[in-house]
Amino acid sequence: MKFLVFIEQRDGKIRKASLEALSLARRLSGGPVAAVLSGKGVTGLAKDLGKYGAGVVYVADRDDLALYSNKGYVGALDAATGQESPNAVLIAASDANAAPDCAMKFRRFTPPPRKALSAPSAHGRIARKY
């Protein structure tokens, strides 16, 4: 299964929930996955995503993305989706704005209920339950 993971950053730092989503995608796919990172001055952040499972990172580093913009961020995700043709797009729960817009734009997935999402930890317990 091919995954594309939306990487959320704030103030030049990758959000922990995005790294968790990236690691989960890698485990589910059995190999490297694609990621998309948007913002201004974020190019340097992409290099660290490989250790969490990213094989390729699509970076949209532009002045107009300095502040969050659904149109800009979803546009970057749309462009990466066109390149990758993933089976699933993962968006961390902390970015509640992008998910509905992506669902409407792609018209091919519906986010599951938050309580249905969980990831077992290495010790067999639930690592995070939404």
Image (cartoon, helix red, strand yellow):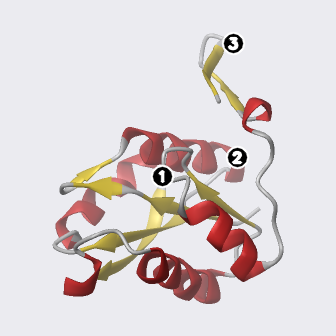
What distance separates the C-alpha of mark 3 from that of mark 1?
21 Å
Q: Which residue is mark 2?
A: 28
For badge 1, the amino acid type reads: Gly
> Residue 56: x percent and y percent?
45, 71
Q: Is residue 54 left or right of residue 68?
A: right
Of residue 93 and residue 53, the one placed in the foreground of this image is 93
Of residue 91 and residue 83, the one placed in the foreground of this image is 91
In this orientation, does residue 130 appear?
yes
What distance separates the C-alpha of mark 2 from that of mark 1?
11 Å
Tell whether label 1 touches label 2 (CB within 8 Å): no
Q: Which residue is mark 3?
A: 124
Residue at 73% over, 70% down: 103
**Marks 3 and 1, the one that precedes in the sequence:** 1
> Residue 91: x percent and y percent?
58, 56
Quadrant in which the N terminus is drawn: bottom right
Q: Which residue is mark 1?
A: 53
